[in-house]
Every structure is written in structure tokens, then in C-alpha cells.
Image: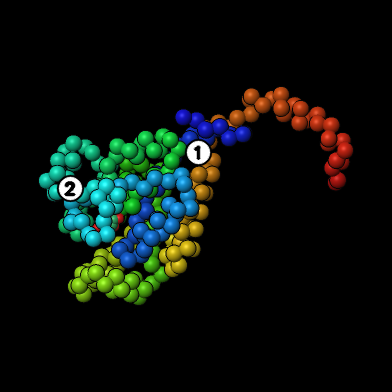
Amino acid sequence: MLFVDSIIRTKGKGNLIVISAPSGAGKGTVIDGVMKINNNLWLSVSMTSRKMRSNDIPGETYFFVSKEEFEERIKEGVFLEYAIYNGNYYGTPKDKIQEKLDQGIDVILEIEIQGALKVKELVPDAIFIFILPPSMKELRRRLVNRGTDSKEKVLERFKTAYKEINEVTKYNYVVINDEVEKAVSKVNAILLSERCRVDRIEDVYLDNMEEEIHELLVDKDLDNDPIEI
Ligand code: 5GP
């Protein structure tokens, strides 16, 4: 489908956006905020073999399956990418993604780094955003304050985060989540800028406008509105 703006015709395809962050950086909150102010977005729902948590909603936060079912899906070629993270499978089903992109809707994949790097190989022009906490001290504070994990789990998450942060240079953009509102508007600004890229133009669309342009050139109003030099 082609989208005709007045002067240009854009390719009309949505962008594939990959967002990663170490746990505790507040990625979920930032993405929720962006989804609220930007209605041209679709957040992909992943499949996982991890256990459901109390705040999970099946089919909304994840599609929950057993390890065996997940392995079946891998064989069937259901996933764009998948990875094992903390001993569980996580994967992005590819079925709806192309459909949304073809409708001109931007698709967000909220995935960890191994998966993001696989997407980078498959779709090099996807947009990669990394969300960081303002400091390691603040990250540790946020992990402890969650209050859902044991001390060992907090330290394990903290160490994983430390390793993950080193991968930031493989991404196109980095957003520090010091204040949620600021981080939301930065991510939204990235999405809006990406939609304005010149390489999204299919055609400059002046051919059918010759008559209109001619009229504009001979516009009598210009005589009444002299151009001052
Ligand atoms: P959690 O278990 O806390 O929901 O997620 C753990 C990690 O898995 C997070 O970093 C999350 O972004 C990532 N994740 C969620 N879905 C996918 C997916 O489909 N593929 C990959 N590679 N990672 C995912």
C-alpha cells in the first residue's frame, strides 16, 4: 500500500523497533508511556516457557507454553528470533509482524540482547534502542525496591545488568531513564524522527501537480504582495 502525502509518496511501511534494557531500567514503564501517546504502534506479544507471575496476563504480556511446546514451535519455524534467558525460552512469533508493518504501523519488540542481535542480522534496517538506568547505584536501588526477589536473585540480576550494559554500542540509540516522562518523550522523538527519514520516500510526487504549480507560478496575488529585497 502506498501513502500519498501532498508532495511525496512514502513507502507506507512501518518501522521495526527493538527495545532492550537491563532488568531494573524501567523498560516496561517507558514502553507503556510511549504506547499511550503514539497510536501508530503495535507491541509484539512474545511466547515464553517461563512461569507466569502474578501480574502476567496470558496472551497480553506473553503467550505461555511449556518447554516442549516451545521446542515444537521452534521446529515449525514460528519465530523471527528466540533466545534462552535465565533458563527459559523467549521468542518473537513472526506471523503478525509483517502484516502490521505492511499497514504502515510501527512494531515494537521488547526483547533481550541476544534476540536483538539476531534481529539485527535478519533486519539490518530495524531501529535498535537501549534503555539505561541513570547509574548503577540507582539500578541496584530499583532492583532491591521491587521487593519480589531474594537477595541472591537481586545480586544475580545486578551482575547480568552489568554485563548487558556493555552491549549498548551495538544499538542505534540510547535513552537514559532518569525520569519516566523524559524517557518516554525521548523514545517517542526517536520514533517520529525515524518516520521522517528521506529513505522512506518512494517517490517525489510532483508529476500530477503540473497544472497546480503553473497556477501558483502565475498567481495574481503575488503582484499585491511584493517581495522585499
Ligand atoms: P521477563 O521474564 O522479565 O518478562 O523477561 C526477561 C527478558 O526476556 C527481558 O529482557 C525481556 O525483554 C526478554 N524477552 C521478552 N520476550 C522476548 C522475546 O520474544 N525474545 C527475546 N529474545 N527476549 C525476550
Q: What residue would you read off at disc 1?
A: 200
- Nearer-the-camera pick, 49 or 59: 59
Q: Which residue lies furthest to the left in this view?
A: 68
Q: What residue would you read off at disc 2?
A: 65
**Picture quadrant where residue 53 is located:** bottom left
- Nearer-the-camera pick, 76 or 55: 55
Residue at 86 percent across and 45 percent down: it is 228
Residue 83 percent location from the top left of the image: 22, 50
Residue 138 percent location from the top left of the image: 36, 73
Q: Residue 174: tell me if it is visible.
A: no
Residue at 36 percent across and 42 percent down: it is 123
Q: Which amino acid does label 1 sit on?
A: Arg
- Nearer-the-camera pick, 12 or 40: 40
- Nearer-the-camera pick, 202 or 79: 79
The reply, left or right, for residue 20 in relation to residue 180 is: left
Q: Which amino acid does label 2 sit on?
A: Val
Q: Residue 78: tell me if it is visible.
A: yes
